[in-house]
Amino acid sequence: MKTLLIMRHGEAGPMQADDAARLLTKRGQAQAFEMGQWLLEHHQPQALLVSPYQRAQQTALEVKRNNQFVFEETCSDIVPSGSASFAVDYIETLISMNDDIESWLIVAHMPIVSYMVDQLVPGEMPIFSTASVAVIQYDPETHKASYTGMHSPQL
């Protein structure tokens, strides 16, 4: 079994014309740092896939203060308007190519994070608060997954 940790970015500033350039607020930075500590204590993610949008990149930087990854990639497929089925197919491919990696962290946005959970575990489509992490157990042999819950920052 592999662990997939699907995380929404921390709290970001208000909408603007260039959505990709939105930055985390101070609270969003603190949320991401807190969740980085939680991830280290509970899951020790080894691989990181992150959206190219600034707020996701900043979230990943805060998480990386507490975690070390053997595999890191910025993935342009996990943006708010991206295709969840394409993103999940890509993640499954990466898992098959990196069998030694047990725990994967994906940092992205609403609504794609909810749709990705539903792609992996049909019927489960949680709403993510900022910096929340959905925990999924995934069997690469059967391509079956189970949703084990959501963890959110206390901030």
Image (cartoon, helix red, strand yellow):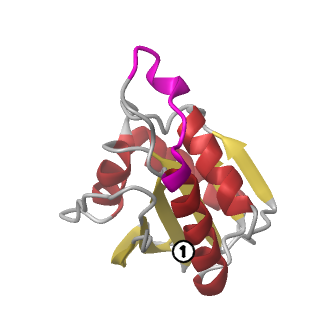
Looking at the rendered image, the quarter that the N terminus falls into is bottom right
Q: Residue at x 41, y 64 (%)?
A: 132
Question: How far across and down, in percent of the image, does residue 44 sit?
Answer: 68, 78
Q: Residue at x 78, y 63 (%)?
A: 69
Furthest residue toward left = 123
Quarter residue 38 falls in: bottom right
Disc 1 packing (10 Å; few <14; some 14–19; many ≥20): many
- In the picture of the structure, the residue carrying the numbered disc 1 is 3
Question: How far across and down, in percent of the image, does residue 68 sit?
Answer: 80, 66
Q: Residue at x 54, y 35 (%)?
A: 23
The amino acid type of the residue labelled 1 equals Thr
Quarter residue 48 falls in: bottom right
The magenta stretch spans residue 65: no
Q: Is residue 52 left or right of residue 139?
A: right
20 lies above or below 147: above
Furthest residue toward front = 26
In the foreground, 115 or 64: 64
Task: Tell me where the magenta segment starts and ends, as one range.
Answer: 16-27
Helix, strand or loop at disc 1? strand
Residue 99 shows in the view: yes
Question: How far across and down, in percent of the image, does residue 110 sit?
Answer: 34, 44
Question: How far across and down, in percent of the image, does residue 53 sit?
Answer: 56, 32
Q: Is residue 147 left or right of residue 126?
A: right
45 lies above or below 106: below
Looking at the rendered image, the quarter that the C terminus falls into is bottom left
The magenta stretch spans residue 19: yes
